[in-house]
Amino acid sequence: MDIQRLVGDLSSRFKLPFERNNWVYKLLEEHDQKPHRKLDIRSLAIHYLFFSDESLRISFEQAVSRFTENLPFRYQEEQEDPVTISAIHEQMENYQAFGKEENYQFSRNGDDLYVQVQQPEHIKKRNEKNLALNSKYQRWLRMELWSRKVVEENDLEDREVLEEMVKRAKEFQQPNDFTSEESENSYENSRLGSIASVAAAALVIDFEWMKAQNLLQ
């Protein structure tokens, strides 16, 4: 849940077009800028795991090791669905990597210390397919967030960024896009949404450039 909270904090918030709500949005934006809102609960793991108080460390390790024994179902129906059970079990295995010292890799660059958590090899291989999909999803999300930002601010800071975003949109586009009703596949809808967002932003920000590049159609 905290990971979803982090994604929401880092994304553009949906705003109702009523002035009476502006003070709420202002408070939320100020709150989202606070340093702790840019972290999620996984960043606390290292503090528990390497804490000098051994009783706290052991308690943390034992709790994380039981993640797969007591799955966090949200609804009773999920407890009866083998596909959901398997997916949640795999997700808990991913989180368990944060509770084992051997999975932490430390490196130093000058005065800066970098920490990276590595999944065990068998879990890493299992996750490869999902990571490939997530990587695409993240690219689509960044395209959509960029589009919202330039339209809201009506300002283009860098011409090369616009050209790069249009190039990405063209690469992701397929011949039969936008010829049928919305898909039930969330990844597919994210891809289409990113393309449409970039197209709309480019038209708003620099219509003449789009026209000169024969990109209106």
Image: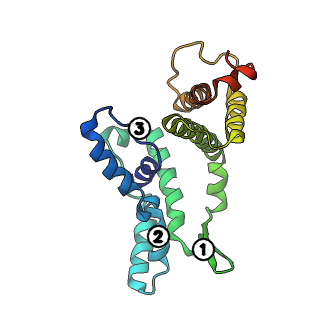
Whole-angstrom CA distance, mark 1 to mark 2, is: 13 Å
Helix, strand or loop at label 1? It is: helix
In front: label 3 or label 2: 2
Residue at point 44% right, 53% down? Answer: 6
Distance, label 3 to label 2, CA atoms, is 30 Å
Within 10 angstroms of label 1, few (less than 14), some, or many (20 or more) residues? few
The image position of residue 109, as x and y in percent, is 69, 76
Pick whichever, 84 or 22, lies toward us: 22
Cβ–Cβ below 8 Å for labels 3 and 2?
A: no
Q: In this view, does 10 lie to the left or right of 122?
A: left
In this image, 43 relative to 71: left or right?
right
Category of crowding for the residue at label 3, using alpha-carbon neighbours closer than 10 angstroms: few (below 14), some (14–19), many (at least 20): few
Where is residue 26 shown, x and y percent of the image? 33, 49
- Is residue 4 at all visible to an observer of this figure? yes
State the CA–CA distance, disc 1 to disc 3: 33 Å
Image coords of residue 17 (percent x, y) = 33, 31
Q: In the shown orientation, is residue 54 left or right of residue 119?
A: left
Q: Residue at x 27, y 40 (%)?
A: 21
- As helix, strand or loop, the secondary structure at mark 2 comes to helix
Give the amino acid at mark 3.
Answer: Asp
Task: Name the residue located 64 percent from the left edge and 81 percent from the top edge.
Answer: 111
Residue type pointed to by label 1: Glu
Q: Is mark 3 on a helix, strand or loop?
A: loop
Residue marked by disc 2? 45
- Pick whichever, 41 or 113, lies toward us: 113
What residue sits right under mark 3 in the picture? 81
Which amino acid, by three-letter code, is at mark 2?
Answer: Ala
Report the disc number at residue 102. Answer: 1
